[in-house]
Image (cartoon, rainbow, N blue to C red):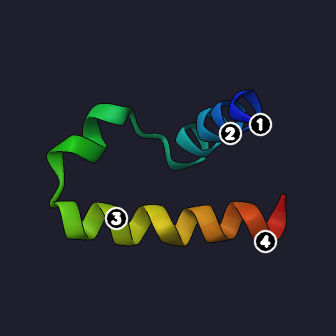
Amino acid sequence: MKTKLKKKNEIFKKILGIKSLKFRECGIYYCNLQFSIFINYLITYT
């Protein structure tokens, strides 16, 4: 389960063209909002 999630995370980073550092740089609310949107996207379309 965790490996699958990590793999999806890597794919998701590649799609967005971002590094994990970028997540820490932006505001917490914004990040969580964006992250939940993409998690929902991943769950729905993968």
- Disc 1 to disc 4, C-alpha distance: 17 Å
**Which-is-in-front pick, marks 3 and 1?**
1
**Residue 1 got which mark?**
1
Give the image quarter of residue 27.
bottom left
Q: Is residue 18 above or below residue 45?
A: above
Crowd around label 2: few <14 · some 14–19 · many ≥20 (10 Å): few
Residue at the spot of label 4: 44
Q: Which residue is mark 3?
A: 32
Mark nearer the viewer, 2 or 4: 2
Left or right, 35 with reference to 32? right
Crowding near the residue tagged with mark 4, few <14, some 14–19, many ≥20 C-alpha atoms within 10 Å: few
Closer to the camera, 8 or 3? 3
Give the distance between the C-alpha atoms of the residues marked 2 and 4, in whole angstroms: 14 Å
Q: Mark 1 and mark 2: span between their CA atoms? A: 6 Å
Label 1: state its secondary structure: loop
Give the foreground label among 1 and 4.
1
Q: Which residue is depicted at the point 60% across and 39% down?
A: 9
Q: CA distance from mark 4 to mark 3?
A: 18 Å
Residue contact between numbered discs 1 and 2, judged by CB atoms under 8 Å: yes
Residue marked by disc 2:
5
Asked if residue 35 is positioned above or below residue 17 in the image, the reply reads below
Q: Which image quadrant: the C terminus?
A: bottom right
Amino acid at dot 4? Thr
Q: Position of residue 32 (x, y in %)?
A: 34, 64
Three-letter code for the amino acid on which mark 3 is drawn: Asn
Q: Mark 3 or mark 2, which is nearer the start of the sequence? A: 2
Q: Quadrant of residue 24?
A: top left
Residue at point 77% right, 36% down? 1
In the rendered image, residue 43, in percent from the top left (x then y), is placed at 75, 64
